[in-house]
Structure formats: structure tokens, C-alpha cells
Amino acid sequence: MAPKYQNKTKRRENAIPRTGASSKIGKGRDNAKGGHRSAETIKRLNLYKSRAIRNKKGTIIGGDFMMGDRAGDRDITGETGRIAPDRRWFGNTRVVDPKQLDTFRQEMTEKVADPYSVVLKRKKLPMGLLREAAEREAPPSQALLGQEPFSQVFGSKSRRKKVKLDQLMLARSDVDPNKDEDEDGAPIKKGGRAEVKADLFNKGQSKRIWGEFFKVVDCSDVVLHIIDARNVPGTRCNMIERHIRDNASHKHLVFVLNKIDLVPNWVAKRWMGELAKDRPTIAFHASMTHAFGKGALISLLRQFGKLHGDKKQISVGVIGYPNVGKSSVINTLISQKSCKVAPIPGETKIWQYITLFKRISLIDCPGVVVDTAGDTETESVLKGVVRAERLETPEDFIQPIVDMVKREHIAGQYKFTKEESNKWTTPTELLETIATKAGRLLKGGEPCLRSASITMINDFQRGRLPHFVAPPELKEDDVEENQGNMGGSTAVIEGVKPEAQELDKIGEENTKSDGTVDGESDQKEGKETGSSGVVADEPVAIAEGEWDD
């Protein structure tokens, strides 16, 4: 038997030498009987074996098949250009001529200011062309030229006098009564230090809270802005409205006037009229058993769901100031306690999704506080942004409450006798009377003013002490006569309109034994019914004896 190394040597001698004949043009294999490969075949084989040559950054710098300026083995030129295959080349294209664009721009200008008009399929509309044209229509230079042409400012026919800044500043400093005001008309503070608020009054303004707010706005197709009917100017956030108008104009903003059971009927009606000028507005009373406005709000959300029929579902974000009833509105709509509810601000920590119907979801958002209005500490406490238990000196906030609440309402809440009601004249005496009557005494029988102050602030925030901010265009002397004239009216929202609501009565809807409203069970099964599926609110008279103003 021959050694193994001899067999290997014999196999090497019998092997066909690798000459690379297939990669050389015009050269065949040794002792070949057949034909040769053509030049095109060799180029094609080399093309198959070639790869993209990349640098350290990953940019393609070489290779035949994937070069940016080559198509295979040819240079890309105007005649031999290579077009990427795409189905859109064989479909219909959307074009618009200048006349159609002008007509569309005019129609959009008329409808953009209407809050009850909805633009459908915005992605298929040339909104970019419209915005660019609107920016080019009236630049600041043209607006200035319209007031003062060049011929009136420069040249021999100029009419404007040359401004002498020295004399102007001297005259302003000596004569001008507004010399101590800045450009916006605000008084200029001379000397002193800026007032610094305690950390307690900065609640609802952290980066985390604002991050949760912007998440909710970004994920929502419809935004419900909850407003407290007792203090509409204080709980209406103009910054949120500007943000949605400027950065998310395709989203729908709806005002929900909550806690209308805590204000007189004419106040709710007047605020409904004021808010409805800007956005669709719903009057609402959050309650698990005797809700008002639930059917109207469900009908409105159903309309938005039909407008977005191309989507599988829409999201409805619920935003607003702390302690305005956002979670209570959600629990009322779904007829169960899904969100944490408490009569104190800051109960909702993070955003959460709640399924209302098969195609409509609700998003609960923590309360945000906008400090751009420059609210004082007293205003923050009266709005309900700050918890009374955490105040160092709650006695300092009793005087504004006494100014806003009538004496008979205070006496009725704390069950004062006529002698006790007429006894106090200052906030301190009032707190002493409340503490003594409730038995909250310190050592030596002294009344605990702090405990009485916390109780009174909590009663004010939770609606036990009736109060409200008067609507605009009303004088304090006209409050009594307006109450009788405006108490029995009805507000109807036009356009994208919910059900008609009778604001002179807080009602009880047709609630079934399972806690649902008529027409609501069909939606939970995924059926979209008409607006007639929701029965209008059946009102029950509210006791108006508490309101003498």
C-alpha cells in the first residue's frame, strides 16, 4: 500500500490548472472543444460578483452595480438615464393650475376662521402652497409702503420730517405721562427685587407635567378643554388654544363648561354664548347618576368620528387646569369609575387611555398651570391649584373669599344663628366663630384659626360656598335684573352642533339600569347610529332659592 502523500501528489498532477480563462476576453480554456464566452457574458458575470464599495462612514464610493452615477456598466447621462421603478409613475397625478389654487385659497380664507367648519383629507390638499402664498401676500415691507411710499419719505417731495432723537427723548422724559411704561404699556419697576413665589405655587408647571400635556395633544384628534363655570377667565388657557391653532390646526378643539350646577342659569347661558363664538361649547355637569350634557357630548364626538371615517379609531384628549373635573367628565362618559377622582388638585399623575366606544378613545391628562398670566398666590389658591393643607398661613386667603361670597351663604353653610351671623365683621372674627362652633379649640380654649381657614378654603374650592366670576358686558348693578331676564333661554350650537341644551335647568338624562344612556349601548357594540340615537337631556328644575343675586 502506497503512502498517503504519494496519492496527494498524483492528484495534484492530474488536476486541471486554474488559468482564469473565463475572465479574459478572447481567451479560451486549454484543450477546450467547445466555444468561448462572449465579452457581454463576462461583463455580466463580473457585474454579478461586484459589490458596493463603502468608506468608513458607509457612503458608497465604488462598485459597478450600485454606483450612484452608473447603471450597470454604463455611465448615467441624459440619454442613458435610469429611472427607479415605482407604481406611482403609472397612476394618476394631482395637479392644480393657478386659477384653481386662487379659488381654493379664497374658500379656505373664508372658512379657516369658522370653528364649526372641518377640512377633510388635508393630506391631499396643497396646504403648503396656501401657507406660502399667505406669507407672501402681505410682508411687512409692503404694509409699510402702503402707509408711507418712498416718494413721501425720500427725495424733494418728502413730507416726513427728520426725527431728532435727542429732543424726542428729552420731551418724553419731561412731559410724557407714560415715561415710566415699557413698550407694552406695563409700568417699569424701579429698584427693588422681583417677587419670588414659593415652590408650592409652582405646581402644575414642571417639565414632566408639560411633557404629559404635549403627549396628549400630539396623540389626540379631538381636544376637550375643560373649563370651570365658576371662573371661566381663570381656567381658560389661551396658550393652549394658540398652540393648537398654530402648530396643530388639523385638530378639533371643543370647550366643555363643567360644574354648571354651581352657578346661576343666566351665568352659564352667557358664558356659553361667549365661548361658542370661538369654539364648539358644551355645558356639562359631571355626575354618575344625574349627569347633564352627556348625550350632547357623545353626539358631538360621534360626529367627529364620522368625519374621520378613514381612521380605525380617533383619540379624544381631555385637558385643562387642575381640579376642573377632567377625570370626572371621563367617568361620566363611560359610566364607571375608571380614572382616579378626588376633590384636590394633582390627583392625576400621568396620562392614560380609556376606551369610550369601539372607534373612540379618551385620554386623561394631568392638570397644567400656565403662569404667563402672572397669577398671584391668592388667585392660585382660589382656582384650586394649591391644596389648603400645605399653605403656611391659610388665614391670609380668607379676605378674598369673604369678598366673593355673600354673608347669607356663609351663614347657611356653617349654620350660623342670626346673632352669630351679625357678630363678625372681620375675617379673623369669622374664623373664630367657625372654629368655636365646630369645636376646634387649642389649649386654653382658644379657637384654632388655621383649622378653620383650611375648612373654609376647601369649602370654597369644592363649591359649598357659592361664587362665580360675572360674564363680560355686565355691570354689578345689573346682576339682579339679568338673572330674571336670562334664566329661561336655550342655547343651540350651529355648524358641528351637538344636541340642544336647556341651560335654565340642570337635568337628568334617560339613564338605564346599567348606567348607560339611550343609544350608547349600540356604540359599545361597534354600531354607528345617527344623532337621533341620543335622547336630549330631560331637565329637572334646580333649586334657585340659594341664588338671590
Image: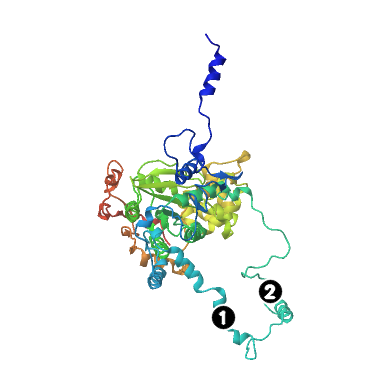
Foreground label between 1 and 2? 1
Q: Residues under labels 1 and 2: Cα distance?
A: 30 Å
Q: Amino acid at mark 1?
A: Leu
User: Which of the two labelled residues, at mark 1 and mark 2, occupies the earlier sequence position?
Assistant: 1
Position in image of residue 195 (x %, y %)? 67, 56
Position in image of residue 404 (x %, y %)? 51, 58
Q: How many discs mark residues in the rendered view?
A: 2
Pointer 1: what residue? Answer: 145
> On the rendered structure, is 238 left or right of 189?
left
Position in image of residue 326 (x %, y %)? 44, 49
Residue reaching furthest to the bottom: 156
Frontmost residue, 149 versus 494: 149
Pointer 2: what residue? Answer: 179
Q: Judge whether 264 appears above or below 187 on screen.
A: above
- The secondary structure type at the circle numbered 1 is helix
Task: Characterize the local packing of mark 2: few (<14), some (14-19) or many (20 or more) Cα atoms within 10 angstroms.
Answer: some
Q: Amino acid at mark 2?
A: Lys
Frontmost residue, 131 versus 144: 131
